[in-house]
Amino acid sequence: MVPVEVLGDEQRLRRIEAVTDATLSRLDVADLFDELLDRVRDLLGVDTAAILLLDVRAQQLIATAARGLEEEVRQGFRVSVGRGFAGQVALTKRPVIVENVTSEKVVNPVLLQTGIRSLLGVPIMAGGELVGVLHVGTLTPRRFTADDVRLLELVADRVSLASRARANTLDQAAALALQRSLIPTELPDVPGLEMTGRYVPGHASGVGGDWYDVFTLPSGWLGVVVGDVSGHGLQSAVVMGRVRSALRAYALICDDPAEALTLLDRKVVHFEAGSLTTALYAMISPDNGTLHLSLAGHPCPVLAVPDRPNIVLPARVDPPLGTGRRRPQRHTTTFGFPPGAVLLSYTDGLIERRGELFDIGLARLTAAVPLAPVDTVAATVMATLDAEHPADDIALLALRRVG
């Protein structure tokens, strides 16, 4: 038998410092993977090193980074959990050593073609869940030691942290792309109406479930929506996208906002369980003079009319969407929309402040709405309510009847 190598304290410390070096944290994920693999090859005196990350849905390991086995990555090698050497590491979630590599013990042809003789692999874990597999190999027979295993597990911990950071980055990028595709960059050009919208994220992710929407209907009426799906991040953005699309579809078959929100409530309860949503849906007549409004747990809009005090429209507020209660009766209230009037709809992040009554914020907003072009309205409201850096997401939609 080959005697087990026992490392001295100084050498062991050098190994640990090499893979916990703070400078590694400044690298992006791809460079960090490569740097860790270079260091582990040097420290362990091995010829190859590779990282395979888990595709959870497919339950397959995907070659993501490699040194000495670059062809594995170029070919996009995949192996199912439980198959071959890496699959066995993933299945058992424990270190695996293969002292004599044969075709019965590995399924990756690149390992055999490269001439690998011995392998050591460890699982990459995060919170008790498998993230992937890290393995090293030698072109000559090698008996790996307990110190080798511990070092490789330390490297796997660094890979786990980096892979989670990468996943969070990808989730955020996907959520941002989704949100940008759903918040309209241009609103319809409607004769006699000016309109503008604002969306300001209230969280570091830059993504939430607030939205606004304006669309013309075949009848000539104009649909106006402001909504808020509970939560933040990619999941809320995904639910928001589905709710937004469903409301557009129901708007095509319903001439009454309350009816459209009733159908939307059924959809949210059945398909988006656990997602509480508030929504304002208004329809403006083809002559712009009449407003039909229904509210599902949403704040009432503010109306500013020439020669009158600004008011909060006294519409009935029905329960939010997705509460799961026995189907509530929903209501539509009709209001006039005079020439020169400004209608401001918003989500609650605009007026809610910690330690302050909701009514105080609403009164501040009501007084702040000017009779002015809509860009001035939006800028004035945002500045007055200090909404540039909110604690919660804000969606705001301003409409002004011209003439």
Image (spheres, rainbow, N blue to C red):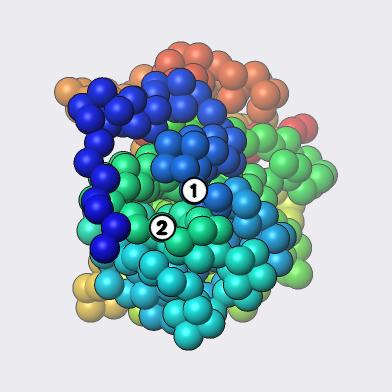
Question: Residue 48: in sight, yes or no?
Answer: yes
Residue occupying the point 32% across, 47% down: 148
Picture quarter with the N terminus:
bottom left
Point out residue 43 in the picture as x, y percentages from the top left corner.
43, 36
* 1 lies left or right of 321: left
The residue type indicated by label 1 comes to Val
The residue type indicated by label 2 comes to Arg
Between 180 and 214, the one lying in front of the other is 180
Report which quarter residue 279 is drawn in.
bottom left
**In this rendering, the label closer to the viewer, 1 or 2:** 2
Point out residue 62 in the picture as x, y percentages from the top left corner.
55, 65
Residue occupying the point 54% across, 38% down: 38
Mark pair 1, 2: CA separation: 9 Å
Which residue position holds label 2? 142
Point out residue 175 in the picture as x, y percentages from the top left corner.
54, 49
Report which quarter residue 349 is drawn in.
top left
Precedes in sequence: disc 1 or disc 2: 1
* Vertical position of residue 44 compared to residue 225: above or below: above
Picture quarter with the C terminus:
top right
Point out residue 39 in the picture as x, y percentages from the top left corner.
48, 35
Q: Residue furthest bottom?
A: 104
Q: Residue furthest front?
A: 1
Local SS, label 1: loop
Which residue position holds label 1? 46
* 90 lies left or right of 251: left
